[in-house]
Amino acid sequence: MSKTFQFILLYFVLAVLHSPCSADPPYPYCSNVTSSILFQNNLNQFFSYLSTSASLSIFKNFTIGNETDRVYGLFLCLGFVTLDNCKKCVDTAIQDIIELCPNNEEATVWEEYCQLRYSNKSFFGHTDDAGNLPLWNRKNISDPYKFRHVVRELLNNLSSLAAFDPSMGMYAIGKANLTIDETVYGLVQCTRDLSGNDCFKCLKDATDEILSCCYFYRGARLLSRSCYLRYELYAFYEGAVEAFPPPPSTGN
Ligand SMILES: *[C@@H]1O[C@H](CO)[C@@H](O)[C@H](O)[C@H]1NC(C)=O
Ligand SMILES: *[C@@H]1O[C@H](CO)[C@@H](O)[C@H](O)[C@H]1NC(C)=O
Ligand SMILES: *[C@@H]1O[C@H](CO)[C@@H](O)[C@H](O)[C@H]1NC(C)=O
């Protein structure tokens, strides 16, 4: 490899490593431009349905058009977001996905409180970890091994609730004690087209991924196309009603 090429490569590696923690949303995941005009028309129709739907519920999946040019799409707002804000978030996501991934065969965009995804192939009921994006709060934690343990247990408890308790709607928030005066707050959520088992698997993989890259940071998120998780040392979902997972076991 030439020195210039190595330098360019290093630059991109660093850019990729550093962008997630500093950049603000939107976070796009694009593919290729489609040549199908019919698909583009269906896509426009999909966008026009979205905004209304997002004022009625925090999740909906859509199938629009005939077999060959069909659009499969969905939006998901975080469980604590009001319908008003869900609609605002989805409206922003529509603008961003049109601008950042224009007329793609498939695309996803994550905003602060929602995600929007579409494809020319059906993806409902399948988890997909391509494009998983970890984001973190740059500050280190003082006791990362204890923190990792507490976070893992919290996320695992919340994941079980979200995946297997039908009353939760594939979403759970809760907290656990880290020290006497420090609490860690967590949120997990899946797209509601998934089965309980797939939701759990998505969140388990997301937990493993975030706790291998980012366990020494004070807070982190993992954006996946099928699920979402986040933990912080503050109640980032302030005001929302927590599910209370069993208290963390003592002595570790
Ligand atoms: C884009 O198209 C090329 C050529 O058809 C294909 O090899 C590639 O996998 C596509 N990329 C995505 C992200 O779909
Ligand atoms: C944070 O912790 C990681 C892992 O222990 C370490 O590699 C990194 O240098 C630390 N960063 C700072 C700013 O202390
Ligand atoms: C939404 O997803 C579910 C679960 O995979 C599927 O059965 C249903 O047909 C989808 N709805 C639409 C409108 O595509």
Image: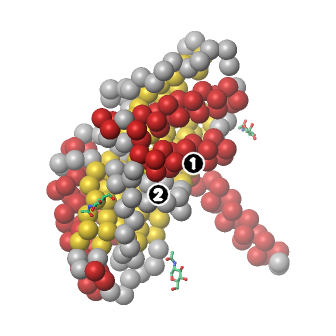
Residue pictured at 67% horizontal, 36% vertical = 216
Q: Is residue 201 left or right of residue 189?
A: right
* Badge 2 element: loop
Residue bearing mark 1 = 205
Residue pictured at 32% horizontal, 86% vertical = 36
Q: Is residue 221 above or below residue 129?
A: above
Q: Position of residue 167 (x, y in %)?
A: 30, 35
Residue pictured at 31% horizontal, 83% vertical = 68
Q: Is residue 231 above or below residue 120?
A: above
Q: Position of residue 251 (x, y in %)?
A: 67, 14
Cα gap from disc 1 to disc 2, whole angstroms: 11 Å
Looking at the rendered image, the quarter that the C terminus falls into is top right
Looking at the rendered image, the quarter that the N terminus falls into is bottom right
Q: Is residue 40 above or below residue 223?
A: below
Residue bearing mark 2 = 127
Q: Is residue 224 above or below residue 96?
A: above
Give, as a three-letter code, the residue at label 1. Asp
Q: Is residue 16 left or right of residue 115?
A: right
**Foreground residue, 67 or 8?**
67
Q: Is residue 4 left or right of residue 170?
A: right
Check disc 2: other Cα within 10 Å, few if <14, some if 14-19, many if 20+.
Answer: many
